[in-house]
Image (cartoon, helix red, strand yellow):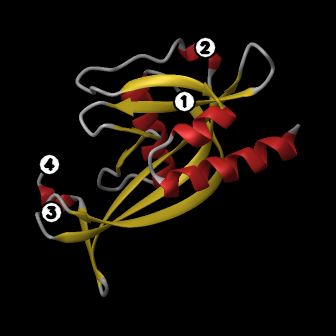
Amino acid sequence: MSTEEYAIHTAHGDEEHSAGGVPFRQGADGGWEILLLERPRYGDWSLPKGHLEPGETAEAAALRELEEETGVRGRIVAPLATIRYPITGRSGRPTTKVVDHFLIAVDPASGPAAPQPPELDIPHWLPLATAQTTLTHETERASIQAAAALLAAAQ
């Protein structure tokens, strides 16, 4: 796929749209666990996310990326946030990255999370409080805080 297929040209400049979310499950101790990715090539910890393919909805992309990056399947429970930040786009030009985050219930029948070739990221289940402090990027921490509020309201 060419780099131009990912760029959306707006009146405010180029945007690249991605989707992902906060995958969760109930841990053995009854508390919530969140699935994060350790990304050695970037030296950070992140939520699963990736580019929307042409014609794909944000919800479909979030679920596809979760499975591609971790091997687990899930279902969208609720939208959480849309975050925006500056990047150098695939085109090499200054671009705004726009990421839609969703709360994603992981299907226990999908098996354990594991790196999925050719992905190099390492998935880890962490207790909710640990996940909030482990994430590298503040914008993603805000999505986990929103997820925590929804999960607390559901109990």
Disc marking residue 109 = 2
Label 1, label 2: how far apart the Cα atoms are: 16 Å
Label 3, label 4: how far apart the Cα atoms are: 8 Å
Residue 29 occupies quadrant: top right
The residue indicated by pointer 3 is 4
Please tell me which of labels 1 and 2 falls first in the chain: 1
**Contact check, label 1 and label 4, Cβ < 8 Å:** no
Q: Nearer the viewer, residue 103 or 53?
A: 103
The residue indicated by pointer 1 is 35
Residue type at tag 2: Ala
Please tell me which of labels 2 and 3 falls first in the chain: 3
Total labels: the figure holds 4
Residue type at tag 1: Leu
| Number of residues whose C-alpha sits closer than 10 Å to that of mark 1, classed few (under 14), some (14–19) or many (20 or more) | many
Q: Nearer the viewer, residue 73 or 130?
A: 130
The residue indicated by pointer 4 is 1
Residue type at tag 3: Glu
Image-based side of 99 in relation to 87, left or right: right
Circle 3 — which element? helix
